[in-house]
């Protein structure tokens, strides 16, 4: 069974994976160079990283068909480190980042994705689509009309080529776009910005090297904060991208294996002079849209990237940036969740606030982790507020025994604890109080504290209080943290000795 699964992941879609891998490799080149420039390092650092991470993750990652390489979100976190301490400390940080990600995988932190609501994922996706589009704008500002014409032609090919009979479904349209626009600019000698203008491509294969930094506690104090941030952002973006690819392909992925795989890939990257990276939503969408489904597509993308930049640099350097801009605009359009726009009218206000907040924070700060954290926090607060409204009390009075019965129904936790305590009429002239919680559930210490507060106050008023109907979970948390039936604990609280 395992052999069949492995064979399917690697060789179940050879033609689609081969062609999509070529497209992804071509699209990775300018991005890797651009991300290197953002981080303040030589272009080869990003190119070597993209090659290494893609190849390693193809073998050890938890999501077939997903592309991982050097990314802009990671590059932004490296700027200060490179500026203050240099490349060698960046390589050491990259290795430590990988170690932390492997630890996260063994701690099964991938399960934390269950706390990220669908609304936050949509906001994350929309924000990334906007960022991908914004990243193309510098290539479309202060340029000649030829660039606009080539970009428009590229988009035309991308969207119309698939409609051609037979051939349209065989060859990925982004690959056709890159080949055709390159041929046009060369044939007619059109003077536009090319990949070669982005920076010098490496002319040698990467070699193993260990970061030249002192192996002491001082070095660790320098690199650990950066490594922790890189590990967190890298895992978050990888988990989110895996979730999106899961949806696009209607398959599941192992997030904890992905965490370990990202860690191994980053350690390998740091050991050949590369920067830290993670999954790339844009390239992953290109891969899936171009027909890539298996691990082979990721492997081919990485291997071809290295072959092209080292051995075919003369050919790659003449590719017009307009062709790659057209491909990335397609990615932006494909990535954006267009159904979320009419959803603003039909979905609840709280849902829209979570989605828009995620988008705004990510686009404003370029910090994916901060945006997702904001979305998760808001979603949790709205959920807690909504659930707290499901707690209410049914009161009844037994005149013969002078007993007031409070029958609580719903969830009692930090957001409904005060309402629970305020439900009681402490000054009512009754002898006995029964608190029936058979249809209620106590979730946290705040709920137990509210119960203690109410029971102790009622007893101070001379009333006999009985609590009935506790389920096992409620009984456990009250027994562990409650003090209303523990005289010694009550004395401590009241200041006794």
Image (cartoon, rainbow, N blue to C red):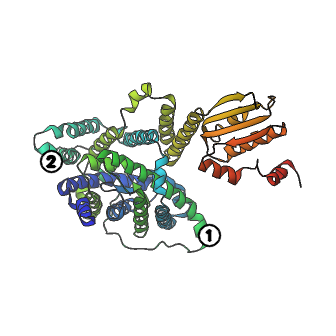
Q: Is residue 450 visible?
A: no
* Mark 2 Cα shell of 10 Å, populated few (<14), some (14-19), many (≥20): some
What residue did someone put label 2 on? Answer: 170
* Mark 1 Cα shell of 10 Å, populated few (<14), some (14-19), many (≥20): few
Q: Residue at x 26, y 59 (%)?
A: 9
Which residue is the extreme one toward the left?
A: 166
Q: Is residue 92 visible?
A: yes
> Could you tell me residue 256's position as x and y percent?
43, 59
Q: Residue at x 17, y 47 (%)?
A: 183
In the rendered image, which quarter contains the C terminus? Answer: bottom right
Q: What is the C-alpha distance between the residues marked 2 and 1?
A: 56 Å
Q: Nearer the viewer, mark 2 or mark 1?
A: 2
> Could you tell me residue 102's position as x and y percent?
46, 65
Residue 144 location, quadrant = top left
In the rendered image, which quarter contains the N terminus? Answer: bottom left
Q: How many marks?
A: 2
> Could you tell me residue 297's position as x and y percent?
26, 57
Q: Residue at x 56, y 74 (%)?
A: 214
Residue nearer the viewer, 68 or 431: 431
Residue nearer the viewer, 486 or 252: 486
Q: Residue at x 39, y 64 (%)?
A: 265
Kindly state the secondary structure of the residue where label 1 is placed: helix
Kindly state the secondary structure of the residue where label 2 is placed: helix
Measured along the vertical axis of the image, is residue 429 above or below residue 359? above
Q: Which mark is residue 218?
A: 1
49 on left or right of 169: right
150 on left or right of 128: left
Q: Earlier in the sequence, mark 2 or mark 1?
A: 2
Q: Which mark is residue 91?
A: none
């Amino acid at each position: 069974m395992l052999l069949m699964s492995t064979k399917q992941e690697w060789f179940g879609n050879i033609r689609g994976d081969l062609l999509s891998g070529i497209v992804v490799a071509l699209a990775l080149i300018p991005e890797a160079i651009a991300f290197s420039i953002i981080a303040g390092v030589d272009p080869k650092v990003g190119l070597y990283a993209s090659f290494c991470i893609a190849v390693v993750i193809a073998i050890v990652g938890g999501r077939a068909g997903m592309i991982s390489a050097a990314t802009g979100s990671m590059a932004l976190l490296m700027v200060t480190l490179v500026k203050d301490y240099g490349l060698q400390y960046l390589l050491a940080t990259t290795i430590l980042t990988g170690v932390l990600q492997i630890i996260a995988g063994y701690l099964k932190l991938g399960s934390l994705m269950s706390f990220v609501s669908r609304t936050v994922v949509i906001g994350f996706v929309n924000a990334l689509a906007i960022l991908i589009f914004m990243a193309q704008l510098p290539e479309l500002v202060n340029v000649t009309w030829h660039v606009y014409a080539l970009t428009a032609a590229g988009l035309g090919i991308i969207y119309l080529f698939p409609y051609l009979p037979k051939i349209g479904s065989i060859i990925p349209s982004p690959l056709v776009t890159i080949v055709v626009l390159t041929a046009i600019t060369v044939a007619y000698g059109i003077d536009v910005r090319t990949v070669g203008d982005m920076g010098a491509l490496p002319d040698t294969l990467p070699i193993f090297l260990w970061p030249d930094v002192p192996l002491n506690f001082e070095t660790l104090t320098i690199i650990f904060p950066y490594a922790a941030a890189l590990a967190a952002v890298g895992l978050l973006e990888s988990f989110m991208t895996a979730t999106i690819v899961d949806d696009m392909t209607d398959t599941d992925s192992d997030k904890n294996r992905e965490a370990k795989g990202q860690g191994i890939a980053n350690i390998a990257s740091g050991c050949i002079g590369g920067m830290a990276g993670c999954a790339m939503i844009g390239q992953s969408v290109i891969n899936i849209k171009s027909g890539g489904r298996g691990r082979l597509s990721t492997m081919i993308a990485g291997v071809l990237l290295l072959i092209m930049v080292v051995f075919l640099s003369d050919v790659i350097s003449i590719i017009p940036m307009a062709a790659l801009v057209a491909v990335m605009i397609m990615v932006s359009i494909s990535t954006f969740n267009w159904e979320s726009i009419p959803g603003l009218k039909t979905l609840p206000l709280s849902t829209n606030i979570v989605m828009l907040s995620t988008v705004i924070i990510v686009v404003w700060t370029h910090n994916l982790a901060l945006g997702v954290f904001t979305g998760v926090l808001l979603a949790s607060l709205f959920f807690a507020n909504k659930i707290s409204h499901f707690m209410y009390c049914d009161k009844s009075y037994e005149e013969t025994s002078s007993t007031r019965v409070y029958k609580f129904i719903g969830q009692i936790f930090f957001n409904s604890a005060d309402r629970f305590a305020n439900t009681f009429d402490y000054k009512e002239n009754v002898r006995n109080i029964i608190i029936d919680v058979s249809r209620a559930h106590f979730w946290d210490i705040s709920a137990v504290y509210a119960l203690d507060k109410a029971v102790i106050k009622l007893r101070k008023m001379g009333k006999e209080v009985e609590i009935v109907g506790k389920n096992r979970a409620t009984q456990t948390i009250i027994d562990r943290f409650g003090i209303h039936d523990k005289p010694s604990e009550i004395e401590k609280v009241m200041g006794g000795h």
